[in-house]
Image (spheres, helix red, strand yellow):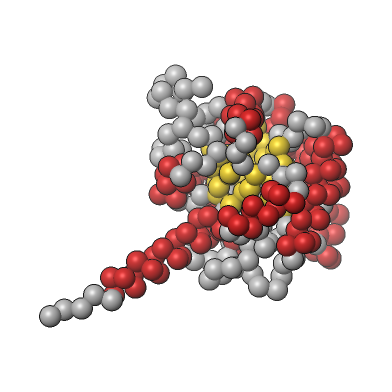
């Protein structure tokens, strides 16, 4: 639906985003969503044909040369950073595809209904639960849950976003989390199988194997579909990095697409800049 003021595509209603994704599936194509931390990333991700762009605070760290996990740390206001990237960098650049806003749902300083109204008014077409506590485990995860700053806050945010006609695409790491998000009304569920492997700041040992990623993704999809057959399911992270990795996941599971952040934005910049600089540096003078 064109914006009546600009004629551009953003923002879209929840159903309009769903219809666009369903059309992609009807065409037997994989849904590709991409994280963008800068305007130029968003511009050329759209040019490459992505279905969705997701903005969250880790994009800023990633494109500053740091690991995406920095987005989970207390290095800034995650909600403010996502809104700032959207307002001043990405939303003015993206012409047609839906842009999704990362929301740090457990931030105790936010009245979430009020924040989501601002997200919607900014021109975002939906929300994503990032930073997410689904990838935090052990003692610290228990502390977060027991002190009211855990994953349940993310579920509550998605339940509220659904009532506000905001499309929602969410990260989960377990079958139980998938079930909770499906019950809250999530439109798309992403199987998060760990921090992306590879590149200059990717993990090496702190991840799962491809077989484990396939098994976990399958359990997540099964649990979500038990609640709602109409949810879109995507994969992300860990060993699922290259187009070939994604092809394997799509063949071995019922996932319908992929969410790339480091694997699209950071990896593309790292390799292309390295190669291009070397090409320039190989020049000689007479």
Say which quarter of the image contains residue 52. Answer: top right
Q: For this view, does 285 lie left or right of residue 93?
A: left
Position of the C terminus by quadrant: bottom left
Q: Nearer the viewer, residue 64 or 28?
A: 28
Residue in view at x 34 percent, y 66 percent: 276
Residue in view at x 40 percent, y 40 percent: 93
Q: Nearer the viewer, residue 269 or 251?
A: 251
Could you tell me residue 113's position as x and y percent? 68, 33
Could you tell me if residue 101 is visible in this image? no
Could you tell me residue 163's position as x and y percent? 72, 26
Could you tell me residue 86's position as x and y percent? 49, 42
Could you tell me if residue 68 is visible in this image? yes
Q: Nearer the viewer, residue 46 or 158?
A: 46
Residue in view at x 70 percent, y 73 percent: 205
Could you tell me residue 127's position as x and y percent? 63, 38
Q: Nearer the viewer, residue 77 or 284?
A: 284
Q: For this view, does 118 lie left or right of residue 104?
A: left
Query: In the orientation shown, which residue stands out farthest toward the bottom?
Result: 286
Q: For this view, does 6 lie left or right of residue 154?
A: left
Residue in view at x 85 percent, y 59 percent: 142
* 280 shown above or below 156: below
* 136 shown above or below 205: above
Say which quarter of the image contains residue 15. Answer: top right
Count of numbered badges drawn on the protein: 0
């Amino acid at each position: 639906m064109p914006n009546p003021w600009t004629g551009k595509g953003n923002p879209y209603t929840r159903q309009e985003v769903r219809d666009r994704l369903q059309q992609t599936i009807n065409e037997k194509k994989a849904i590709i969503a991409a994280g963008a931390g800068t305007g130029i990333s968003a511009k050329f991700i759209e040019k490459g044909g992505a279905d969705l762009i997701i903005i969250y605070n880790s994009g800023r760290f990633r494109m500053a040369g740091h690991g995406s996990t920095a987005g989970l740390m207390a290095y800034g206001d995650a909600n403010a950073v996502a809104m700032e990237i959207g307002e001043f960098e990405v939303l003015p650049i993206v012409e047609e595809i839906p842009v999704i806003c990362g929301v740090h749902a457990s931030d105790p300083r936010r009245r979430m209904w009020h924040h989501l109204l601002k997200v919607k008014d900014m021109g975002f077409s939906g929300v994503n639960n990032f930073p997410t506590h689904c990838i935090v485990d052990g003692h610290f995860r228990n502390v977060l849950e027991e002190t009211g700053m855990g994953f349940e806050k993310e579920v509550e945010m998605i339940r509220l976003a659904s009532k506000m006609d905001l499309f929602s695409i969410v990260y989960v790491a377990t079958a139980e989390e998938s079930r909770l998000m499906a019950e809250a009304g999530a439109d798309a569920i992403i199987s998060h199988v760990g921090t992306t492997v590879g590149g200059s700041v990717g993990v090496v040992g702190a991840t799962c194997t491809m077989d484990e990623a396939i098994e976990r993704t399958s359990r997540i999809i099964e649990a979500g579909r038990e609640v709602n057959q109409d949810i879109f399911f995507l994969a992300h992270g860990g060993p699922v990095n290259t187009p070939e990795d994604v092809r394997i996941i799509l063949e071995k599971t019922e996932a319908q697409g992929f969410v790339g952040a480091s694997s699209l934005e950071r990896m593309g910049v790292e390799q292309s800049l390295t190669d291009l600089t070397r090409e320039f540096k190989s020049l000689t003078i007479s």
